[in-house]
Image (cartoon, rainbow, N blue to C red):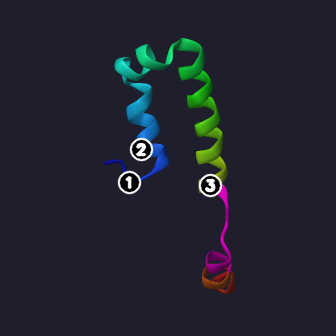
Amino acid sequence: MPESLGEALHHLKNSKLMREILGQHVFENFIEVKTREWDAFRSHVTQWELERYLPRL
């Protein structure tokens, strides 16, 4: 099982089976939407991170 959406996307992008099942158009759009979601998630700074790391600057 993938540990993150990013890892799942990596495997999905290389899956000929999923590309065939979903069809090219749906497959590409799904990858695009989920990649944006992953980018937004991993670039979000949480309150915990601010409290933990900001005082060290």
Q: Residue at x 64, y 35 (%)?
A: 33
Q: Which three-letter amino acid code belongs to the residue tagged 3? A: Phe
Q: Give the spatial CA distance, label 2 vs label 1.
A: 7 Å
Q: Which three-letter amino acid code belongs to the residue tagged 2? A: Glu
In the image, which residues are magenta? Answer: 43-50
| 36 over 24 or under it: above or below | below
Query: Element under label 3?
Result: helix
**Position of residue 52 measured from the top left corner of the image (x, y, whole percent):** 60, 83
Answer yes or no: do the residues labelled 3 and 2 have beta carbons within 8 Å? no
Query: Element under label 2?
Result: helix
Which mark sits nearer the N-terminus, 3 or 2? Answer: 2
Disc on res. 56 = none
Quarter in which the C terminus is drawn: bottom right
Question: Label 2, on which residue?
Answer: 7
Question: Label 1, on which residue?
Answer: 3
Left or right: where does residue 30 sit relative to residue 8? right
Answer yes or no: do the residues labelled 1 and 3 have beta carbons within 8 Å? no
